[in-house]
Image (cartoon, rainbow, N blue to C red):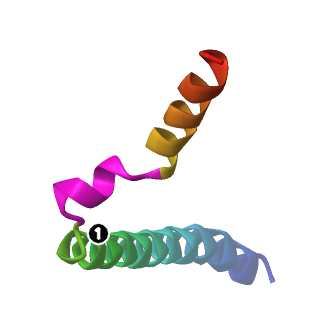
Amino acid sequence: MKTINKRIFAIVPIIAFALTIVISNGITRTIEHRRAATSDQSQPADETLNGSYSNLINTFNASSTR
């Protein structure tokens, strides 16, 4: 009975470490895949200037000068 407990205590950390590596590799691949997909869809310079922040600032400037 004691040898089974010793084996479990030896094997469980190894399995947990291996699972951590597998999960982190999967997350890294997912992030790289999404970065590659978003870099293919880059916007031209004209469209980036018409973003929500630009509209917000322009609206604020227009309302504050009245």
Residue 43: quarter of image: bottom left
Question: Which residue is found at the position 55% from the left and 23% from the top?
Answer: 61
Give x and y (percent) for residue 42: 22, 67
- Residue 2 against residue 46 in the figure, above or below: below
Question: Which residue is found at the position 24% from the left and 75% from the top?
Answer: 41
Question: Which residue is found at the position 19% from the left and 54% from the top?
Answer: 45
Pick out the residue farthest to the right. Answer: 1
- The kind of residue tagged 1 is Arg
Question: Residue 2 vs residue 47: left or right?
Answer: right
**Could you tell me which quadrant the C terminus lies in?**
top right
Give x and y (percent) for residue 35: 29, 69
| Residue 49 among magenta residues | yes
Residue 37: quarter of image: bottom left
Name the residue nearer the viewer: 51 or 30: 51
Name the residue nearer the viewer: 33 or 22: 33
- Residue 31 against residue 1 in the figure, above or below: above
- Residue 7 against residue 56 in the figure, above or below: below
Give the mark count: 1
Name the residue nearer the viewer: 22 or 17: 22
Question: Which residue is found at the position 48% from the left and 75% from the top?
Answer: 23
| Residue 28 among magenta residues | no
Give x and y (percent) for residue 10: 58, 70
Q: Secondary structure at mark 1?
A: helix
Q: Which residues are magenta?
A: 43-51
**Residue identifier under label 1:** 35
Question: Residue 39 vs residue 16: left or right?
Answer: left
Pick out the residue farthest to the top. Answer: 65
**Could you tell me which quadrant the N terminus lies in?**
bottom right
Q: Residues within 10 Å of mark 1 (few under 14, many from 20)?
A: few
